[in-house]
Amino acid sequence: MNAAPPRGRLVLIPAPLEQPGELRPWLCEPDRLLAGSLRRFYVETPKTARTWLKALPLTAPLQSLELRALPEANGSTKWTEWLAPLLAGETVGLLSDAGCPAIADPGALLVRAAHAAGIEVHPLIGPSSLLLALMASGLNGQRFSFQGYLPVDRTERKQAIDRLAIRSASERETVMLIETPYRNQALADSLIDTLPGEGHLSIAIDLTGSSQSITCQTVATWRRQRPTLPRKLPTVFLFLC
């Protein structure tokens, strides 16, 4: 009786945070070699993934690699087909558009399915905008939460900020938020208008990029000199009340 082939690994590959024109090596050398040796990738956006993969020491032509876009995270995807190559012994990469896969990016359901199937999940070391922003904020790094995107509606967004401010004050918890870049200004204005004046708000723009800017000050100070935020650069917002 033939033994089953050893299972492959699901390698989680962080992507750069900077813009493609500013690209620098972002993985340590052993991880660059590992990522460059793979033939199959599950990705957020194939076009963006090709940009990052071109910077790796690929052992096969880029056009020969299989890049498959992850589905919408609605919980209805049947992952059996996705896991078949790994169950057959192939190691596959998971790559999002920026930062760490499955952290404010697609991929968590695939990772969970891999665990359920007994497949080894192997995360590589790389940039995370959330942790970089928290490190640079000076706010509480012992207790923090990531709340993702707030509602677009102004009234609902204010209600969400009020609720999170109460939680932050009672738990001494740093709250982290992100927004689609063209709505950065709207979120900044809502935070400055809604948070208590004695609270601290940090705004971290274009982390690791050429336009990087990280400013943390009281909300009252922000009110005296309101920021004008870029509409195209990723930004992380953090506050502690």
Image (spheres, helix red, strand yellow):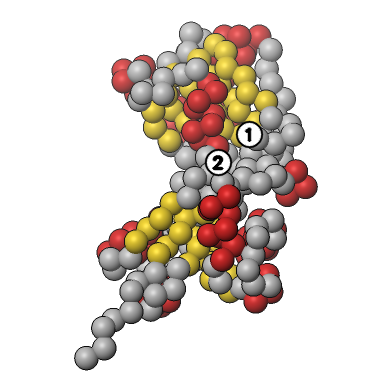
Q: Nearer the viewer, residue 174 or 241?
A: 174
Quadrant of residue 52 within the rendered picture: bottom right
Discs 1, 2 touching: Cβ within 8 Å? yes
Q: Which quarter of the figure is the N terminus placed in? A: bottom left
Amino acid of disc 2? Pro
Residue position for label 1: 207
Q: Is residue 217 left or right of residue 83?
A: right
Question: Residue at (70%, 36%) from the top-left corner?
Answer: 209
Mark number, residue 127? 2
Toward the front, the furthest residue is: 30
Amino acid of disc 1? Leu
Percent position (x, y) of residue 123?
43, 51
Q: Residues within 10 Å of mark 1 (few under 14, many from 20)?
A: many
Quadrant of residue 4 within the rendered picture: bottom left
Question: Residue at (53%, 21%) from the top-left corner?
Answer: 137
Q: Compared with residue 178, is residue 92 higher up or lower down, i.e. above or below?
A: below
Tell which tag, 1 or 2, sits nearer the viewer.
2
Between the C-alphas of marks 1 and 2, the distance is 9 Å
Question: Residue at (72%, 46%) from the top-left corner?
Answer: 23
